[in-house]
Amino acid sequence: MSTLGIVILALVVLALILVKKTLVIIPQSETKIIERLGKYYATLQPGINIIIPFIDRAKVIVTMRRGMYVYSDTIDLREQVYDFDKQNVITKDNVQTQINALLYFQIVDPFKAVYEINNLPNAIEKLTQTTLRNIIGELELDQTLTSRDTINTKLRAVLDDATNKWGIKVNRVELQDITPPESVLQAMEKQMQAERNKRAAILTSEGEKQSQILKSEGEMAATINRAEAAKQQEILRAEGEAQARIRKAEAEAIAIEKITTAVGQSTNPANYLLAQKYIQMMQELAEGDKTKTVYLPYEATNLMGSIGGIKDLFKSE
């Protein structure tokens, strides 16, 4: 190859390098900070951008990728998540606990993210750790375990306010894991078991109490019902006896009325009825094989005399 060919080839290669250095293609949701002679010049937008080679250069910053700090001249504008390692915090009641936090943030101002902080991922991590220690230090262990939403809200508010000057927007903070010491876990397990036993005993006693109450109420209702039934039975029996007596009296009154009509007004119907009763009684005494002796009181002579007066009645019949 001649010298002219080598020169032309070199010029072509140099032109290609200049074109590559001049044209910068930025993907969507990414950007680059361009410095011209060491001074901020522009923030490149997605698409094709033209810069001056060897005069303009992209600012190199520290980012985190796959849990590692790396240097890059590209700034990712999408929401990012940092999964920090577990850290030891001390609660208000002096219990050392390990907490693992997740941080969701987004770069909204690339200029501030580059020039307001030296190492953005490390700064966010340290700020999250110190803020988390301060918040947990104000809570007891039980509150820490049951107030994740409250802790997340407080932590996000503090981080969002502190990172505002870095061009960062903290969207969410989540406590991924809270791990108390093993001794505390065992004590909590025993406490929970004791609480369950206590609730079981209370429920059992409450059930027995309700059972006794229902049983006594049932017995009381049964006794009242039995008493009411007996009362109604006695009332009905008394009413039946009263009705029977009334009916009997009415029948006797009708009989006396008919006897009076039959024997006439001159004869006392009571003597007639008394004679019938007397004859019936004598007939009953005469029945049977054995001889019967009947003793009458002295006053019975008057009765016999009154009965003697009815013979005329029988003769008339």
Image (cartoon, rainbow, N blue to C red):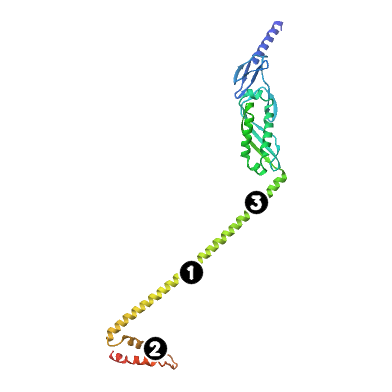
Closer to the chain start, of discs 3 and 1, is: 3
Residue 281 image label: 2
Residue located at (69% from left, 34% from top): 130
Q: CA distance from mark 3 to mark 2?
A: 89 Å
Q: Quadrant of residue 112?
A: top right
Q: Is residue 306 visible?
A: yes
Contact between labelled residues 1 and 3, with CB atoms less than 8 Å apart = no
Q: Nearer the viewer, residue 151 or 316?
A: 151
Q: Is residue 80 visible?
A: no
Residue 165 at x, y percent in the picture: 63, 26
> Tag 3's secondary structure?
helix
Closer to the chain start, of discs 1 and 2, is: 1
Residue 164 image label: none
Q: Quadrant of residue 44?
A: top right
Q: CA distance from mark 3 to mark 1?
A: 47 Å
Q: Nearer the viewer, mark 1 or mark 2?
A: 1
**Number of marks present in the image shown:** 3
User: Badge 2 local density, few (<14 within 10 Å), some, or many (20+)?
Assistant: few
Which amino acid, by three-letter code, is at mark 2? Met
Residue 113 at x, y percent in the picture: 65, 25
Residue 227 image label: 1
User: Badge 3 local density, few (<14 within 10 Å), some, or many (20+)?
Assistant: few
